[in-house]
């Protein structure tokens, strides 16, 4: 840990940028139907607006965490914030779906530079037994963003147009930049080598895997062009990812993915659990907002207001959970959170019919907020508790990478599932992804099959959360801060110690 006289102002400055990233993700979810209508495209292309962002966000995280160690987390954060803010302006000025997808990819790159620095700074300026409240703030930020993002997005889309969900980032980005310059300290840097082959293998592997999963339905899981098939892309992507892992194990240079960190039991389990969380949070919002707007006829603002109970409970409870995980084994809190979240999504799925009283959806929304509050802080605290300062950037990069890998796979998987269920449930000629002509509410004869398809799609993230519950249940009891520092005195890196 590095001594910083005022760690909390520094954290608040970083959290503002992190908040902007999360708000941007939730804003886009509520705006998808309007983007679909305005740019005359289809569901699959609109989902690529999210997938491109998540893919460009996930792939560089391993190296941007390391870059923060090498050049300083403050410098990387400011660079990423500038890229993110300018890309937001580009998104708002985009006149067609292809330009918007490219701009979102650049925006994701900026987010990738920023995100690992927030966790790295927490790890380096807060003692292990004081990180609970700091991680609680990190979790509360997610909860508040879930509230502000959809509501702000709904108001902006209804009042000014979908472009303004991106324009709003520009003034916030400027304020966040000034705060970070003034309040975030310059921390010691560490020399690192950069594994460019590892970056190439992971980037190619992730792109092929995500493209194959998301576009599979478009090509009926068959031939794309010539000898290239959907399953060929998916298998090739998996081969590249396997080659990446092997290279990390046998390469002579400093690895991009420090596999020795996974010797720590809790670090490995927390990464598996946050992957599931990223997968589920990303995939659950798309069918829900499509249902609210295309079946129930809610405006973007009204559909966003349906998420208020979730965001309020999550934002209010997260700080208390942050303090709680310093006192009890985080596995009890996290496991409970995952189980409650599974129940909430299955409950929501069961309600998705054309004539369900709309207020009933507020009940599982509230339960979702309670569940979410019990997941973020316990997982992040468990993942980072035993990391040495030199490993802070690498560990934060790995943790955020696994979360974003889960998110991008969730986005791709829900796109494929929605397309498949629409094809199966909708009348002939109305299924698949071709709903670009839908303006506002769907014709009444499509309400029931569309509701059924969206409800079935919600089951996938619900079941995935059960895997997270199992991972959390296997957490080992956290070691005392005295034991952690004793290990660091005896050995150069704490990551080689058992978790």
Image (tube, rainbow, N blue to C red):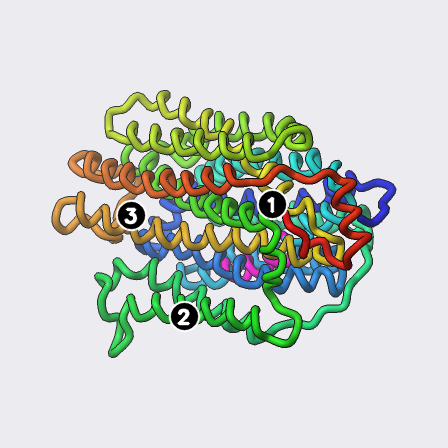
Local packing at callout 1 (Cα closer than 10 Å; few below 14, some 14-19, many 20+) is: many
- Foreground mark, 3 or 2? 2
x, y percentage for residue 12?
72, 40
Q: Front-most of 352 and 490?
A: 490
**Can residue 147 be seen in this snapshot?**
no
Which residue does the image show at 12% across and 49% down from the upper left? Answer: 428
Secondary-structure class at tag 1: helix
For disc 2, the marked residue is: 239
Q: Going by the image, does 360 lie left or right of 183?
A: left
Which residue in the structure is indicated by mark 1? 20
- At x 49%, y 56%, the residue is 53
Q: Residue 44: horizontal and vertical position, in percent?
A: 32, 55
Determine whether 401 is above or below 245 in the image.
Answer: above
Tell me, yes or no, whether the two marked residues, 1 and 2, touch with CB atoms within 8 Å: no
Between 73 and 343, which is closer to the camera in this rendering? 343
Q: Give the range drawn in magenta.
A: 104-115
Label 1 vs 3, first from the N-terminus: 1
Residue named by callout 3: 418
Report, in whole angstroms, how far the alpha carbon at label 3 lies from the one at label 2: 27 Å
* Residue closest to the far left: 428
């Amino acid at each position: 840990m590095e001594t910083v006289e005022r760690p909390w102002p520094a954290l608040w400055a970083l959290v503002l940028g992190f908040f902007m990233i999360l708000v941007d993700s939730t804003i886009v979810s509520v705006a998808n139907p309007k983007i679909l209508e305005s740019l005359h495209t289809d569901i699959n292309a609109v989902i690529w607006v999210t997938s491109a962002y998540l893919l460009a966000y996930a792939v560089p995280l391993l190296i941007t965490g390391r870059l923060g160690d090498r050049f300083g987390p403050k410098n990387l954060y400011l660079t990423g914030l500038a890229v993110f803010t300018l890309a937001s302006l580009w998104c708002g000025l985009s006149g067609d779906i292809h330009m918007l997808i490219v701009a979102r990819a650049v925006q994701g790159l900026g987010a990738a530079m920023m995100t690992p620095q927030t966790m790295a700074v927490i790890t380096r300026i807060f003692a292990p037994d004081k990180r609970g409240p700091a991680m609680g703030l990190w979790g509360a930020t997610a909860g508040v963003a879930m509230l502000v993002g959809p509501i702000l997005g709904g108001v902006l889309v209804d009042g000014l147009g979908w472009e303004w969900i991106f324009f709003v980032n520009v003034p916030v980005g400027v304020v966040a930049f000034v705060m970070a310059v003034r309040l975030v300290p310059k921390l010691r840097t560490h020399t690192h080598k950069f594994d460019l082959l590892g970056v190439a293998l992971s980037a190619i592997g992730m792109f092929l895997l995500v493209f194959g999963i998301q576009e599979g339905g478009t090509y009926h899981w068959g031939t794309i062009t010539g000898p290239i098939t959907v399953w060929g892309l998916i298998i090739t992507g998996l081969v590249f990812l396997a080659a990446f892992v092997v290279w990390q194990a046998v390469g002579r240079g400093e690895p991009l993915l420090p596999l020795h960190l996974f010797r720590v039991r809790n670090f490995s389990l927390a990464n598996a659990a946050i992957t599931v969380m990223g997968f589920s949070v990303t995939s659950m919002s798309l069918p829900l907002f499509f249902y609210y707007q295309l079946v129930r006829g809610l405006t973007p603002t009204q559909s966003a207001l349906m998420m208020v109970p979730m965001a309020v409970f999550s934002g209010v409870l997260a700080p208390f959970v942050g303090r709680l995980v310093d006192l009890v084994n985080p596995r009890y809190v996290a496991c409970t959170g995952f189980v409650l979240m599974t129940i909430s999504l299955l409950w929501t799925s069961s309600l998705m019919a054309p004539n369900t009283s709309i207020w009933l959806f507020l009940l599982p929304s509230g339960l979702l907020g309670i569940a979410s509050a019990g997941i973020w802080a316990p997982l992040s605290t468990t993942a980072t508790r035993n990391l040495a300062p030199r490993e802070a950037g690498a560990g934060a990069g790995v943790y955020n990478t696994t979360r974003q890998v889960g998110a991008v796979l969730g986005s791709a998987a829900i796109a494929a599932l929605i397309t498949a269920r629409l094809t199966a449930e909708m009348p002939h000629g109305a299924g698949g992804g071709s709903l670009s002509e839908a303006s506002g509410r769907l014709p009444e004869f499509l309400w029931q099959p569309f509701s059924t398809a969206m409800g079935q799609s919600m089951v996938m993230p619900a079941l995935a959360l059960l895997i997270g519950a199992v991972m959390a249940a296997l957490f080992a009891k956290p070691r005392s801060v005295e034991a952690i520092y004793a290990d660091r005195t005896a050995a150069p890196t704490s990551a080689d110690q058992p978790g």
